[in-house]
Amino acid sequence: MPERASKSISLKQLELFLALMSADNIASAGARLDMSPSATSHALRTLEQTLGAPLLDRNAPGIQLTYAGKQILPHVRDLFASLQIIRATVNASAGLKSGLLTLGSLGASSSLNLLPPILELFKSRYPGVDIFVTEKADTELERAILERRIEIGVVALPKPDLDTLPLVTDHLMAVLPEGHELADREVVGVQDLVNYPLIMTRAGSQPVITRMFARAGAEPHVAHDLSQIMSILEFVKRGEGISILASLVLPRHYDGLVYRRISPMSERKLALACLNQRRLSPAAHAFWSLVREQVSSGKMKFGQWL
């Protein structure tokens, strides 16, 4: 048992402890907080000395918490949640006339079709609250919510560690150039798609596409790996290959392209997510409640192809 130090615990040390939960190693956790390797190591050891127990099992591979580390983890998360609420409550006092809400978006699916109508309605009710939207990959978005860096995000289900509010279910569509030999079908099979070069998306629906081929026992020939939806559409239009995209990201019409349903259908359920809906800041709580109200009443419709 390390000797207990007289120093008090700092928020930076606890923030580092949380960052460890989604890092490959101690140094990378510190780098995320702009800490040098030596400062990271010193902060972690000081925290352990102050608490009087090791928090990491340094004999285990990767990042492994000790029993003490596992016991304090939920309390550290609660502490940062409380701090977030304190800041937001001060900013949003006087009936949500001011404040800032940071929302996470998993990419074009939510940024193009899900969030705009919600944001428009929210701003009409709470014009003084500023909203900052940041796009991240689904796994990064979940990590940001768990680490309290984002209060609410649009994620792909399932997310067992988060509170979720289901929004919509979309499905994968084959994107083909006009005149393609599969274009005269209303529905194309997964096995049919492996016969053509595939322009793979690096956006949020990539895991669903990968699982679709795996379930069919098929291996696609990935000719290109692109992250921008417009780039993918242009590559398909120019005959570089076909693509598979989630229905929510597709424009209603794109010259030179056709969309076809895929059999068997592969779905993706999207939801609003937070760490604990009962501990949201006032602005986040208002946003969550508004979305729940709109979804439950059926007033809010998403997407073109659902």
Image (spheres, grey):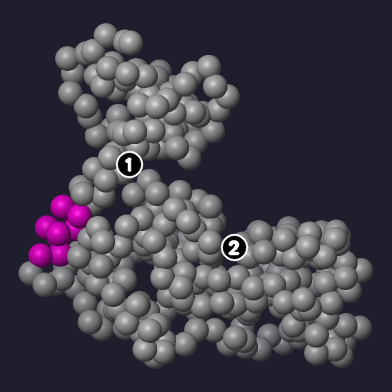
The part of the chain drawn in magenta is: 85-93
Q: Is residue 138 above or below residue 128?
A: above
Q: Quadrant of residue 251?
A: bottom right
> What main secondary structure does the magenta stretch of the protein show?
helix
Q: Which comes before the other along the chain, label 1 or label 2?
A: 1
Reading the image, the residue beneath label 1 is 74
Q: Quadrant of the N terminus?
A: top left
Q: Give the image location of residue 2, x and y in percent.
A: 31, 10
Reading the image, the residue beneath label 2 is 204
Q: Give the image location of residue 241, x and y in percent.
A: 83, 70
Q: How dense is the environment of label 1, judged by Cα within 10 Å: few (below 14), some, or many (20 and up)?
A: few
| Residue appearing at x 23%, y 51% in the figure | 84
| Residue appearing at x 46%, y 76% in the figure | 167
Q: Measure how far apart labels 1 and 2 are at the Cα level.
A: 28 Å
Of the pair 168 and 66, the residue shown nearer to us = 66
Q: Quadrant of residue 48?
A: top left
> Magenta stretch containing residue 92, yes or no?
yes
Of the pair 180 and 211, the residue shown nearer to us = 211
Q: Give the image location of residue 276, x and y in percent.
A: 32, 57
82 vs 275, left or right, is left
Look at the numbered disc 2 and give the secondary structure of its residue: loop
Q: Amino acid at mark 2?
A: Gly
Q: Give the image location of residue 15, x and y in percent.
A: 32, 36
